[in-house]
Each structure stands twice: as structure tokens, then as C-alpha cells.
Amino acid sequence: MNGITLEVIWFDNDMIEVLFRCSNGYFSGQAEIYLANDGFEEIAQTLRGFPSTPSDSRDVEIGTFDPKYADGGARMHFHCLDSPGHAAVDVQLRGNGSKGLGEVESVALRIPIEAAAVDRFIRELRAIDKTIGATATLHQTGRVD
């Protein structure tokens, strides 16, 4: 499956650990990332209404990019590619073993998306519960050029 998937793999009263997977059909990666208990809602709120204009962009960062801390991190830059509103998300992913972006166990890729897929992703993020194996997926639309 091409796109982004967040899967709950562990949780307690303070945080949720997710397996973050991303692929555009050419490149892919995955990392275990910690979120605050309200992390899914924060992502959903940030993405609500995207894309609203051809110049709309949103940034989401989860986990950590500091190699001194456990697990990895993901940066997602949602933006429009042109005036008709074709959109993409640029993902930078750092695994637990990576010292930084561009190093071993890191990946950067672009995933084409559309507004309807973002809306579905937001609904899934808001519906996800603290159940091992629960997922939310942002599906890729089209192909990477």
C-alpha cells in the first residue's frame, strides 16, 4: 500500500507508540515513533480543511529527531504542487538507529495525495483508539513523477 500508515503498537496512560510506515512505490521506510495521548487529534486538527487554497501548506512533526532519545521521528510537509490544487506530502523519516536525516536508517520521499484522501485520513485519526493494531492510513493518489 502506498501512502502513510500509523499503527498503534503500544500505549500507556501518558503516550502511544506507533509504527509509522510510508511508501510512494519507489521509496519506503518505517520507524517506531512516540506520540502524546492526544497526538492523533493534533494531527487531525492541523490537517483539517487541507488544501484550502493553492498556496496552502501544513507541517506536522511527530516523534524526535534527536538521536539521544528512543525511537524515531517523522516530518510531514503537506503542500499544493500547482494552482489547480494538486497536492503532495513530503516525508522525512528518521529511524531509531539514525544519527540524522541523510544518514543510515532515514528516508525522504514525496507522496501525491488529494483532498478526499486527507479527509478520510482525518476521520480515521479521530476514530483510532488505544487498541494494539488500530490504524489510520493516508492513501497515495496517482504516481510520483
Image (cartoon, rainbow, N blue to C red):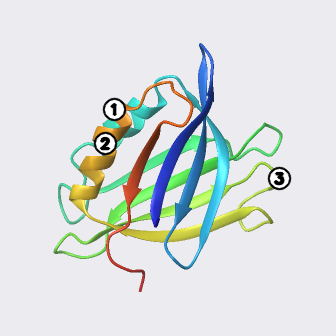
Sort mark 1 into few (<14), some (14-19) or many (20+) by Cα contacts within 10 Å: some
* Quadrant into which the C terminus falls: bottom left
Residue 55 quadrant: bottom left
Residue closer to the observer: 70 or 55: 70
The residue pinned by badge 1 equals 126
Residue under label 2, please give it. 122
Marks 2 & 1, CB-CB < 8 Å contact: yes
Residue sticking out furthest to the bottom:
145
SS of the residue under disc 1: helix
Residue 56: quarter of image:
bottom left
Label 3 to label 2: alpha-carbon separation: 30 Å
Question: Which quadrant would residue 87 be assigned to in this image?
Answer: bottom left
What residue is at 64 percent from the left and 41 percent from the top? 33
- SS assignment at label 2: helix
Kind of residue at disc 2:
Ile
The extreme top residue here reads: 13
- Name the N-terminal-most of marks 1 and 3: 3
Question: What label sits on residue 97 in the rendered view?
Answer: 3
Secondary structure beneath label 3: loop
Residue 65: give x, y in percent of width and height: 69, 47
